[in-house]
Amino acid sequence: MSDSPAIEDLKQALRRLPGVGPKTAQRMAFHLLERDRDGARLIMQALGSAIERVRRCGRCNNLSEQEICTLCSSVRRDPGLLCVVESPADLASLEQSGAYNGRYFVLMGHLSPLDGIGPEELGIPRLEALLDAGGVREVILATNLTVEGEATAHYIGELARERRIYVTRIAHGVPLGGELEYTDRGTLARAFSGRREA
C-alpha cells in the first residue's frame, strides 16, 4: 500500500532526526496523525518558534535567544577557564554534571577533512580571537573520544599552547568511542575532576 504524498513527506522529514530509521519514522508519523494531532501542532509551533528565535551566541557559539548567552554573561562563571566542546548537547551534559563553572566554546562539530569540515567550518578563527583577547588561563578540551574528536582536540591544544595557555584534556572516565551527550553525570563529574594536561 502506498501512502499519500503528505504522509511520505512527513516520514521523510522525521527520518532526518538522529537515530530515526524508516520504521520509527512511520510509527511516529502514524501516531501523530492517528492519535495526537494536538501534539503534532505543538511540535510544529515549538519548532517554528525555535527556528525563528534561536541563533548562535556571539561569544561561545552555543545556541541562544540572546546575542550573548546566559552562560557567557554570568558573573559567577570563571572567565579564565574555557572548555571546548563539539555540540550544544555536550555542553548541556557537562552543565548537568555540576562539575564545571567556567565558560565554553561550542565547535558545532569536529574536524573531518573527508567531509569538508575544516577549521573555518568549526569557527576556529573565532576561538583564536577569543584566546588572543587574553584572560583565558586554561583551555579544557572536552571533545568526544573518537578519532575525529581526538584530532580536533590536538589541533586546538596546539593553538592554545602557541599562545602559552595551559591545556588540559578531560580524563578518560568517558568510554573510548563514547559521546558526552550519552554519558551519565557521575562519569562526567569524575572525568572533569581528573582532567590532565594534554
Image: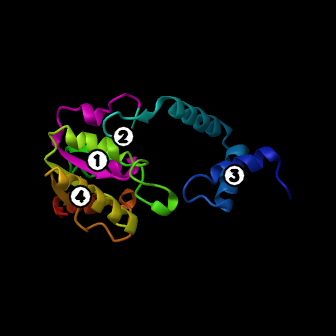
* Residue 153 picture location, percent across and down: 30, 60
| Quadrant that contains the C terminus | bottom left
Instruction: Judge whether residue 144 can be spotted in this image.
Output: no
Q: Amino acid at mark 1?
A: Glu
* Residue 67 picture location, percent across and down: 36, 28
| 16 vs 148, nearest the viewer | 148
Q: Secondary structure at mark 1?
A: helix
* Residue 147 picture location, percent across and down: 38, 68
Instruction: Judge whether residue 131 can be spotted in this image.
Output: yes
Q: Secondary structure at mark 4?
A: helix
Mark 3 Cα shell of 10 Å, populated few (<14), some (14-19), many (≥20): some
Mark number displayed over residue 158: 4
Quarter occupied by residue 174: bottom left
Mark number displayed over residue 12: 3
Q: Amino acid at mark 2?
A: Asn
Q: Who comes first in sequence, dot 2 or dot 1?
A: 2
Residue farthest to the front, as pictured: 162
Q: Who comes first in sequence, dot 3 or dot 2?
A: 3
Based on the picture, tell me whether residue 24 belongs to the magenta stretch. Answer: no
